[in-house]
Amino acid sequence: MLSQTMSLLPVSHSVLAALGSSGLPKLIASSVSALHVRYQHSAISDDDELPDSRDREHKDPRLEKIEAIRQKAMLGGGEKRIQVQHKKGKLTARERLSVLLDPGSFLESGTFVEHRCRDFGMDKTSFSGDGVITGSGLIAGRPVFVYSQDFTVYGGSLSESHAAKICRLMDRAMKAGAPIIGLNDSGGARIQEGVMSLAGYTEVFQRNVDASGVVPQISCILGPCAGGAVYSPALTDFVFMVRNSSYMFLTGPDVVKSVTMEEVTQEELGGAEVHTTRSGVAQGAWDNELELLSAVRELVTYLPLNNRDKPPLYPSSDPDDRPCPTLDRIIPENAEVPYDMRDVLAEVVDDRYVFEMIPDFARNVISGFARLGGETVGVIANNPLVLAGVLDIDAAIKASRFIRFCDSFNIPLITFVDVPGFLPGTQQEHAGVIRHGAKLLYAYAEATVPKLAVITRKAYGGAYCVMSSQHLRGDVNLAWPSAEVAVMGSKGAIEVIFKGHSKESMDKEVAAYEEKFYTPLSAARHGFLDDVIAPRDTRARLIRELRLLKHKSVSRPWKKHGNIPL
């Protein structure tokens, strides 16, 4: 996917040099080096005169004036500030749009908007556009609405007018039924405007909520994002960051030091690594802006335009009935030996590829987009390679949010189960594992999209119930012959059932317990599994079942909304 996007990267040699110094991959650099920024050659400064063309007498001077203002707006805060941006290894707001969107597809709106502030010397300076570029364009031929904050204009700070442009864009996106993409690079609220800038932020937040579940929302953090500004990305569906150049925090290092006496850098406080490995705020991090914007293009190809649309179909050369013989021997004989669930997913999905979301956070569960028979699916899977695949607070939060997004936008859910239960201990209990675990249960139970699940090995206790079981209205529940569906592991179960018995008798009972429950047949006999299949047939079976559920319809009792245990 990345290579397909490389031909769409029109950025300048100066940007290339700046990004190259921060480790731009050679593949991208070689593709970018021959291309140029479209607007740089056409923009004019205050000192330039209008071109003296032969047909000047046929031009409307009013239109010439308007075009002169438009061309000046192309330069944002001016060449000097653009150079500073490049020296930081960052693209300008317009260059980012050139990378993100299909060539020639961007339609700008609000070009001539200026701020209305007259305090603190603000009446002496203004820039057309007021620090944010808004408009619509195409990604892989499909419409999106996008805003790009311009750090060269007042540090990208948000004013009343700046916010109004973003709000109008979001209103248009909801009416048109198309995704909203925000390219964030801002110093925060414009202090000179006081409460007006705060009101502007809140208007944006309200629209983030209004658009939630209506159109996909994607936030790209390409510089600072601090204070109240962080709440807009936090309300969107996906947050992508750039390593070592983008930051998100409510209070900066100086405030932290003054209040807590703790010395911390911006990167340590709210850098990409923090938010993709510890906080779970961001779904992905990339080494530079070109890679991030390419990932956004890829993400959009998996998504429908809105909640009434279906995800796009991408037929694959990967045969629907391709057998997966590797899966027949992927489960270790010893139930205590881990394996990587990613290897299972790679065998099953189209082209052996999963576009993972937040892969370095809560690594005991996998979430991401893939395709089966050309159709987008959301994949949730326990990963026995990390913490034996046990569910904990972070895993529950990660999975439940992803499930709810998929359900909002008509994306079927495929669940692979190998889970020994919830992580025990006072740390988890005191931090609210009951409440957070209930989020995952709620998300699966609430979802009305097709829900298919495959138990590969362990499915114990409450974790069995939670992971898209038939009891939560799972549509298709399959198991491999290696599946174990039980309340708990054999040793723990026997110690409870036969407490006080001799070791010899308990050992005998362990064998009996394992014979009864270390098999999928008990659950299948009760009708809780639809079939026990050979692992090699998993791909073909899921594709056939998925197509049968294409027109699934569910009726639920009317309610304003449920009360998910937040």
Image (cartoon, helix red, strand yellow):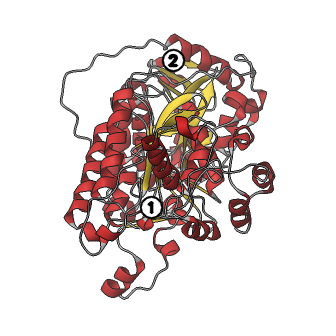
Q: Is residue 24 above or below residue 347?
A: below
Query: Looking at numbered disc 2 in the image, what kind of residue is underneath it?
Result: Asp
Mark 1 Cα within 10 Å, few/some/many (few <14, many 20+)? few
Q: Nearer the viewer, mark 2 or mark 1?
A: 1
Q: Residue at x 45, y 11 (%)?
A: 551
Position of residue 368 measured from the top left corner of the image (x, y, whole percent): 56, 40
Position of residue 526 measured from the top left corner of the image (x, y, whole percent): 44, 19
Res 130 quadrant in image: bottom left
Question: For numbered disc 1, what is the local secondary structure?
Answer: loop
Q: Residue at x 64, y 40 (%)?
A: 54
For this rendering, which residue is in front, 356 or 286?
Answer: 286
The residue to which callout 2 is attached is 530
> From the image, which quarter does the N terminus lie in?
top right
The residue to which callout 1 is attached is 279
- Left/right placement of residue 345 relative to residue 363 reads right
Which of the two labelled residues, at mark 2 and mark 1, occupies the earlier sequence position? 1
Query: Looking at numbered disc 1 in the image, what kind of residue is underneath it?
Result: Ser
Position of residue 123 measured from the top left corner of the image (x, y, whole percent): 29, 68
Position of residue 231 measured from the top left corner of the image (x, y, whole percent): 34, 56
Q: Is residue 457 visible?
A: no
Question: For numbered disc 2, what is the local secondary structure?
Answer: loop
Mark 2 Cα within 10 Å, few/some/many (few <14, many 20+)? some
